[in-house]
Amino acid sequence: MRLLERVRKEWFMVGIVVAIGAAKLEPSVGVNGGPLKPEITVSYIAVATIFFNSGLSLKTEELTSALVHLKLHLFIQVFTLAFFPTTIWLFLQLLSVTSINEWLLKGLQTVGCMPPPVSSAVILTKAVGGNEAAAIFNSAFGSFLGIVVTPVLLLLFLGSSSSVPFTSIFSQLFMTVVVPLVIGQIVRRYIKDWLERKKPPFGVVSSSVLLMIIYTTFCDTFSNPNIDLDKFSLILILFIIVSIQLSFMLLTFVFSTRDPDAEDSVCRP
């Protein structure tokens, strides 16, 4: 009975394990072009659902008040797009002398230069009781900044350049983040009383959508025939990622608890 209660309480973590296991068993279901059509259902519909959901659940006053927290926004963007990738680069200089696969290290640096995923950043912030409105603003703003900043960081740290389809990325972010959020806020005005009376499970809906994103992501990973890496490198890089994640979580916790506005916490997956 206790085990069942524990599973119900930690259903999201259990769901992640199940999603990864299902992707491993039959990756063809969730790959691009597969039956689920993740290039449409995930890239557009799932992300739009998450932000429409946030627009419905958040009070307009919370969103507007989050915009004026300039100190918080500056900290998040500098931490995400400057401090984090620089620290990763310094750390990888030490790892470059080891036998870890070079492309795994380059991949880790590439991920470190990316802005946080708009969907998971918002969902995880909401799950831990952080400032969801601030997470929405910084995820969207960081993604727009990333269109310009990320290629510069990749050129600086990896010496590689690439062309960025600015218009298509900008329009996709606008249509999947800004528009659903605004529509959610508009709909909220008409059903505000019903929402406050019924209290729909917004968190469960967003987390379920995130599980779908995780599932299709791993379907793509497991279906890639070109992945040929030794198990030692994979296990070691997994340990490194977990260690980095825990270290930065501790660091941000220390910084955030020094501020009297303790509720202004935002997740950086």
Image (tube, rainbow, N blue to C red):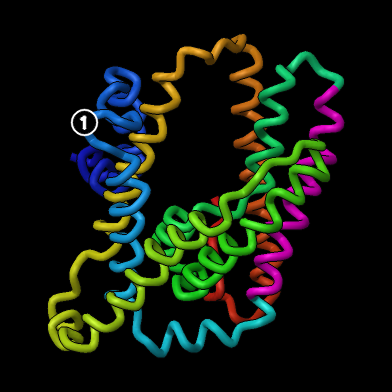
Residue ID at (72%, 28%):
105
Per the image, the residue denoted by label 1 is: 35
Considering only vertical position in the picture, is 49 above or below 233? below
At 63% from the left edge and 35% from the top edge, which residue is drawn?
Answer: 241
Q: Is residue 22 magenta?
A: no
114 and 126: which is toward the camera: 114
The front one of 110 and 160 is: 160
Q: Position of residue 88 (x, y in %)?
A: 76, 42
Residue at 23% in and 41% down: 2
Would you place residue 240 above or below residue 209 in this image?
above
**Quarter assignment of residue 54:** bottom left
Q: Position of residue 152 (x, y in %)?
A: 76, 51
Residue at 56 percent of width and 50 percent of height: 165
Q: Label 1 amino acid?
A: Pro
For the record, the magenta segment spans: 73-96
Label total for image: 1
Residue 266 location, quadrant: bottom right
Residue 205: x and y in percent read: 25, 57
Prevailing secondary structure of the magenta residues: helix
Q: On the rendered structure, is 193 left or right of 164?
A: left
Q: Is residue 84 above or below residue 160?
A: below
Few, some or many residues within 10 Å of mark 1 (<14, 14–19, 20+): few
Q: Secondary structure at mark 1?
A: loop
Q: Nearer the viewer, residue 166 or 60?
A: 166
Q: Position of residue 44 (x, y in %)?
A: 34, 53
Quadrant of the image containing the N terminus: top left
